[in-house]
Image (cartoon, rainbow, N blue to C red):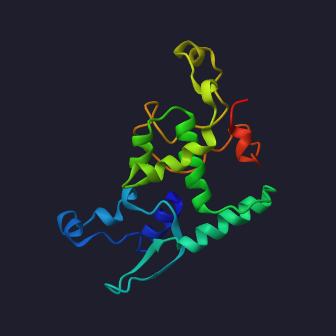
Amino acid sequence: MRALHQRDRKEGFGEVWLPHALARKYPRAGREWAWQFVFPSARRSEDPRSGVVRRHHLHPDTLGGAVKRAAAAAGIARPVSCHTLRHSFATHLLERGCDIRTVQELLGHSDVSTTMVYTHVMNKGARAVRSPLDRLEQARAPYAASPLDPACGHLLLGLALAPVDGSHVTDQHALQPQ
């Protein structure tokens, strides 16, 4: 994405739309790397508000199609969508011991009862209770950096984790401890 932004800048583009007050306060901020879209569109188009040609964000349907194609390529037979990743993200946070109120806030739920839906898959009873000493002895999973800090309180990036060893996970339960 950075190379795409640099190419746009060389070609006289590379600026994203910012809300009016922000654009007035920081007139050059839209050209900075930090303000670029995480999922940029493949091509530039004319901004209907200003007539300026710029790169916009990827259309949500495009991302959804890419997720469906990736699931098919991975051999996942069940229906998969971006919303599936959201459910998986919430479930894994709860399984890792994150507070349900933190998960509620991360997902933007106004009522905790909406977040409680994710607890049904965690019906483990007494097996779910772990001593702090158990956690010290637990081997680290071979996954890239977590999108959350250790306290489960700061969302860095709400994307699925990719195995470092290059293997592919074809079943959401394959990530769960045995």
Is residue 8 in view from this perspective? yes
At 69% from the left edge and 39% from the top edge, which residue is drawn? 175
Image location of residue 79, percent across then percent down: 72, 63
Image location of residue 158, percent across then percent down: 51, 50
Q: Quadrant of the C terminus?
A: top right
At 41% from the left edge and 62% from the top edge, which residue is drawn? 36
Counting the numbered discs, the total is 0
At 40% from the left edge and 41% from the top edge, which residue is drawn? 102
Please identify the quarter of the rendering in which residue 144 is found. Answer: top right
Nearer to us in this view, 104 or 121: 121
Please identify the quarter of the rendering in which residue 145 is found. Answer: top right
Image height check: is 31 above or below 147? below
At 64% from the left edge and 25% from the top edge, which residue is drawn? 127
Is residue 145 in view from this perspective? no
Image location of residue 55, percent across then percent down: 45, 74
Nearer to us in this view, 85 or 58: 85
Nearer to us in this view, 65 or 15: 65
Image height check: is 101 above or below 107? above
| Farthest-out residue, front | 125
Image location of residue 84, percent across then percent down: 62, 57
Please identify the quarter of the rendering in which residue 140 is found. Answer: top right
47 relative to 28 in the view: left or right: right
Nearer to us in this view, 45 or 62: 62
